[in-house]
């Protein structure tokens, strides 16, 4: 998986570079970790939302927020059309599901 850090990319932590003409899908990727002692992975939740604060409040209200720190990434239409995104939303994804999705999202 390509890892890049650039101010020109939206999803650089997922390794995805937005393409010309790509647009926001309306889904947010929320990645949770326990900051102590060493950034332990807690899970990933994908939810339909236009803003990170709204997304975090939504998953908290739904009782699926595992706590810890959260990083959020807007998912593009090009990413979400590669999978049946509804089958991954509003639930805690396993580490394996998250890794598989990252790989699918980054396929050309």
Image: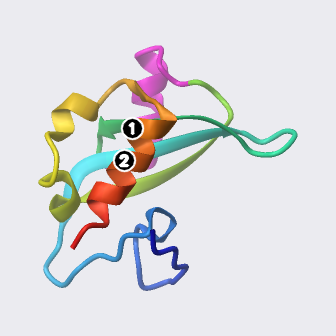
Q: Which residue is drawn at 31% across and 66% down?
A: 106
In the displayed structure, would residue 81 be above or below residue 54? below
Q: Where is residue 108 in the image (x, y as percent from the top left)?
A: 21, 73
The kind of secondary structure element at disc 2 is: helix
In-front residue for pair 87/72? 87
Query: Magenta stretch containing residue 91, yes or no?
Result: no
Where's residue 11, x and y in %?
A: 41, 67
Q: Examine the residues drawn in magenta and state their main secondary structure.
A: helix
Q: In which quarter of the image is residue 91?
A: top left
**What residue lies at 14% left-to-right and 40% top-to-bottom?**
84
Q: Can residue 51 be seen in this view?
A: no
Q: Position of residue 88 (x, y in %)?
A: 28, 33
Q: By what rule are the colours in the image chosen?
A: rainbow
Span of residues in magenta: 50-65
- Give the x, y percent position of residue 86: 18, 33
Query: What residue is drawn where x is 52% and y is 74%?
Result: 3
Is residue 67 among the parts visible in the rendering? yes
Quarter holding the N terminus is: bottom left
Do the residues under discs 1 and 2 have CB atoms within 8 angstroms? Answer: yes
- Crowdedness of circle 1 by 10 Å Cα count: few (<14), some, many (20+)? some
Q: Mark 2 points at which residue?
A: 100
Residue drawn 51% across the image and 83% down it: 6
Q: Is residue 81 left or right of residue 87?
A: left
C-alpha gap between disc 1 and disc 2:
5 Å
Residue 105 position by quadrant: bottom left
Residue 37, above or below 2: above
Left or right: 39, with 85 as reference point: right
Q: How busy is the neighbourhood of tag 2: few (under 14 within 10 Å), some, or many (20 plus)?
A: few
Residue 61 drawn in magenta: yes
Q: Residue furthest top?
A: 63
Q: Name the residue under label 1.
A: 97
């Amino acid at each position: 998986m390509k890892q890049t850090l650039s101010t020109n990319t939206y999803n650089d932590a997922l390794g995805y570079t937005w393409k010309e003409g790509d647009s926001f899908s309306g889904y947010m990727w929320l990645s949770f970790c326990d900051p102590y002692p060493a950034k332990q992975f807690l899970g990933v939740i994908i939810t339909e939302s236009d803003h990170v604060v709204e997304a975090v409040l939504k998953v908290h209200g739904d009782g699926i927020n595992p706590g810890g720190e959260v990083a959020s990434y807007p998912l593009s239409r090009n990413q979400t059309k590669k999978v049946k995104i509804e089958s991954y939303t509003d639930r805690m994804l396993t580490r394996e599901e998250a890794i598989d999705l990252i790989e699918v999202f980054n396929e050309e």
